[in-house]
Amino acid sequence: MLLWNVVLALAWAALTSDYKFLNLVLGFMFGYFTLAILAVRGVIPSSGYVKKVVLVLNFVGFYLKELISSNLRVATDVLKRDIKVKPGIIAVPLSLDKDSEITLLAHLISLTPGSLSLDVSTDKSVLYIHVMHLDKDNIQRIKDEIKMKFEQKVIELL
């Protein structure tokens, strides 16, 4: 279905004689909606492509929001005159079992400012993460955030 969507986007660009990026994106969107309508009407078999694209877009939006908010949080801390950083390492139990899922989660956490994935236990049940602000009061909150936000989104996506 992705290949058909790309073919439809290229056909749109050929019909409009405009191969600029925005026109290709517009053609991709028209192709996507065409494939979605055809799948709903039963003209073509439904392959889950339509739902997967929505999940990917939802995931990208979620991660961009998290990335911007964590960047602002770290920038605010850096610009303060009296930085009170309390770094620490936490162990987050994992519900993921595949290497690809764990790798994606670890990279997402590391790419978000203020946190860094350090290691995974040998049995793949715990992810060790270095965080910038760690108090005894917020350890469980940080673990819950990672489990409910990042890990749940990875499960939905993959």
Image (cartoon, grey):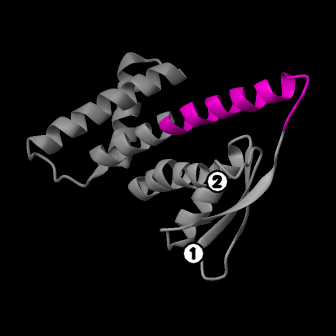
Give the class, few, some or many, for how many residues have Cα within 10 Å of label 1's Cα (few <14, many ≥20): some
Residue extent of the magenta highlight:
62-84
In 3D space, how far apart are the residues under numbered discs 1 and 2 (Cα atoms)? Answer: 18 Å
The secondary structure that dominates the magenta segment is: helix
Residue 99 in sight: yes
Residue wearing tag 1: 125
- Which numbered mark, 1 or 2, is in the foreground of this view? 2
Q: Residue furthest right?
A: 81
In reply to whether residue 83 is colored magenta, the answer given is: yes
What is the x, y in percent for residue 131?
74, 50
What is the x, y in percent for residue 120?
67, 71
Q: Are marks 1 and 2 in contact (CB under 8 Å)?
A: no
Q: Residue furthest bottom?
A: 123
Establish if 120 lies above or below 78.
below
Query: Residue at position x 63%, y 35% from top?
Result: 67
Establish if 74 lies above or below 50.
above
Query: Residue at position x 73%, y 40% from top?
Result: 113
Establish if 151 lies above or below 16.
below
In reply to whether residue 72 is colored magenta, the answer given is: yes
What is the x, y in percent for residue 155?
43, 58
* Nearer-the-camera pick, 15 or 126: 126
Residue 19 in sight: no
Residue wearing tag 2: 139
Query: Residue at position x 55%, y 39% from top?
Result: 63
> What label sits on residue 104 in the rendered view?
none
* Nearer-the-camera pick, 156 or 118: 118
Q: Earlier in the sequence, mark 1 or mark 2?
A: 1
Residue 41's quadrant in the figure?
top left
Q: Amino acid at mark 2?
A: Ile
Left/right placement of residue 63 relative to residue 74 reads left
Residue 55's quadrant in the figure?
top left
